[in-house]
Amino acid sequence: MAVTADFLRGRGRSSLSAQELDILEQIVDRVEVLPARSVLTRRGDRLRESTLLIEGAMCRYLDARDGYRQLLAYHVPGDFVDMHGYTLHRLDHDVATIVESRVAMVPHDRIDAVMRDHPRLAWMLWRSTLLDAAMHREWIFRLGRLDAAGRLAHFLSEAVERMDVIGRVRDGAFALPLTQQDLGEACGLTSVHVNRTLRRLREEGIADVARGEARIFDRAKLARVGEFDPDFLYLDDGPWADAKD
């Protein structure tokens, strides 16, 4: 199976030609396995390659002066975790693994060649960064306007959609290797508040998170609690499914 097989899967990948998919595979320099809870890139590091997550889970985050961390993004297989670093040359945050993760490394000089010689593929790499930006806007909405239950429900709704589109949801269950502290850092909540809210979602028969797995019992109700609309994910079968031209 191609290491880039999940890149934009269900979110525009079908518009790429067989030749473009082959080029995408060829620009990968190497595949690495990163340990769990390890930092890939520190804030301010000079970047000379970009990282595509193949398997596992990763995050972007900032540390506050008091030592508490704020998750800025949660990455699933198929995501370039730092493509914006191609043009910015450095990041303003840290990137780390959550569990042991397999990644593909793409040197920036090879992306230069794509930009020069393959405009359609270049456009799709740009699209991936725009999808990141759309998710960032939704995270701002979640943190600014929703209560605790809404924040967790929105996060879980997003996670199940993104995992589903890459074929990693089975009977409503999918891998979610986040601790309650991690969830709190993603949703602006304390671990105690996360625990109470997850118990509420479980008792109401909506969702459960335990032992590195999330199980969604009522996806529609979860979306209602989280005021979740997946249009910002630009799924191929959603209202934002763009023409392939």
Image (cartoon, helix red, strand yellow):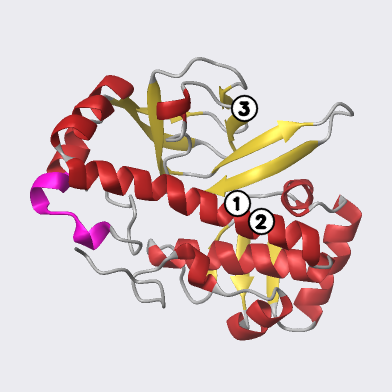
Whole-angstrom CA distance, mark 2 to mark 1, is: 5 Å
- Secondary structure predominantly adopted by residues drawn in magenta: helix
Whole-angstrom CA distance, mark 3 to mark 1, is: 14 Å
Q: Which residue is mark 2?
A: 139
Specify whether residue 135 is painted magenta: no
Whole-angstrom CA distance, mark 3 to mark 2, is: 18 Å
Instruction: Classify residue 32 by image quadrant.
Output: top left
Residue placed most toward the observer, 228 or 37 = 228
Q: Position of residue 170 (x, y in %)?
A: 46, 71
Using the rendered image of the protein, determine whether residue 2 is visible from the camera's viewpoint.
Answer: no
Per the rendering, the mark at residue 41 is none
Residue placed most toward the observer, 63 or 208 = 63
Q: Position of residue 204 (x, y in %)?
A: 78, 83
Per the rendering, the mark at residue 92 is 3
Instruction: Classify residue 54 by image quadrant.
Output: top left
Q: Position of residue 226 (x, y in %)?
A: 70, 73
Packing grade of label 1 (10 A; few <14, some 14-19, many >=20) is some
The residue segment tinted magenta is 13-21
> In screen coordinates, is 44 left or right of 209?
left
Asked whether the residues under the numbered discs 2 and 1 touch, taking CB atoms below 8 Å apart as contact, a structural biologist would say yes
Residue 17, relative to residue 72: is it above or below? below
Packing grade of label 3 (10 A; few <14, some 14-19, many >=20) is some
